[in-house]
Amino acid sequence: MPNDIDILMSFYNGSEYLGEMLESIHAQTYTDWTLHFRDDGSNPSELKKMLTEINKHDKIKYHERDGQNKGASASFS
């Protein structure tokens, strides 16, 4: 079993779902993970809400966005 799992999450204007998703990840029994969060060009108010939520957690790494919506497949590459 690996010592650390990387979870990739990309969001586009999804602040209303983020809290529930993070709660689900934190509720898992395996705790040796890091979540890599990328915003896929959300509007500024949505991004602000999401950053407020992810900054509450020390196991989440925010990757700066380039301001463009790339879509799901390109967002993870």
Image: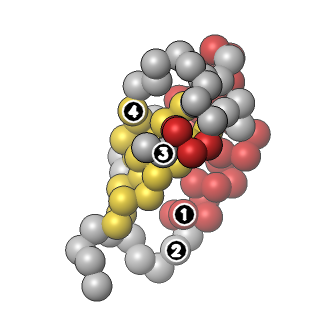
Q: Amino acid at mark 4?
A: His
Q: Amino acid at mark 2?
A: Gln
Q: How far from the left and from the top, in percent, is residue 38?
A: 49, 36
Looking at marks 4 and 3 on the same chain, the residue that comes earlier in the sequence is marked by: 4
Q: Which mark is residue 9?
A: none
Q: How far from the left and from the top, in percent, is residue 60?
A: 40, 46
Q: Amino acid at mark 3?
A: Phe
Q: Quadrant of residue 63?
A: top left
Q: Which residue is mark 4?
A: 63
Q: Amino acid at mark 1?
A: Ile
Q: Which residue is mark 2?
A: 28
Mark 4–mark 1 distance (CA, rounded to whole Å): 19 Å
Q: Which residue is mark 1?
A: 25
Q: Nearer the viewer, mark 4 or mark 2?
A: 4
* Residues tagged 4 and 3 counted as in contact (Cβ below 8 A): no
How many neighbours does mark 2 have within 10 angstroms: few (below 14), some (14-19), or many (20 or more)?
few
Query: Which quarter shows the N terminus?
Result: bottom left
* Residues tagged 4 and 1 counted as in contact (Cβ below 8 A): no
Mark 4–mark 2 distance (CA, rounded to whole Å): 23 Å
The image shows residue 67, relative to residue 35, as above or below, that is above
Q: Which residue is mark 3?
A: 76
Left or right side of 41 for 33: left
Could you tell me which residue is drawn at 37 percent across and 51 percent down? 59
